[in-house]
Image: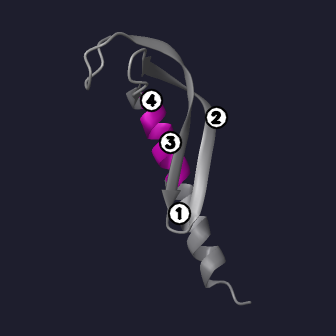
């Protein structure tokens, strides 16, 4: 596979996915991905993207509940 940014070779491995959103920080370790050997850019395949999006949506809905809870 070729990197979309620098055109170098990508290798299949695992990496962390991190997001900072709506007042929270989420890190998911050991996500399968293609990683560029030159620039380090990750590429996640469709299945992993779908699962990550499900996790983020779930956390989003729970964060809203926490933020709206009475002190």
Q: Earlier in the sequence, mark 3 or mark 4?
A: 4
Please state the horizontal and vertical placement of residue 41, each as a whole percent of the image. Answer: 39, 28
Disc 3/disc 2 C-alpha distance (Å) = 11 Å
Residue identifier under label 2: 29
The extreme right residue here reads 71
Image color mode: one colour
Residue at horizontal 66 percent and vertical 75 percent from the top? 66
Tag shown at residue 6: none
Q: Which residue is under mark 3?
A: 52
Q: Which residues are magenta?
A: 47-56
Circle 4 Cα neighbour tier, 10 Å, few/some/many (<14 / 14–19 / ≥20): few
**Residue 47, numbered label:** 4
Residue 68 locus on image (x, y percent): 61, 83
**Between disc 3 and disc 2, whose residue precedes?**
2
Element carrying mark 3: helix
State the CA–CA distance, disc 3 to disc 4. 9 Å
């Amino acid at each position: 596979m070729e990197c979309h940014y620098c055109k170098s070779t990508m290798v299949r491995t695992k990496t962390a996915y991190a997001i900072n959103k709506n007042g929270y920080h989420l890190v998911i370790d050991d996500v399968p991905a293609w990683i560029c050997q030159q620039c380090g850019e990750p590429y996640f395949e469709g299945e992993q993207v779908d699962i990550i999006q499900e996790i983020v949506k779930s956390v989003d809905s729970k964060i809203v509940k926490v933020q709206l809870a009475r002190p």
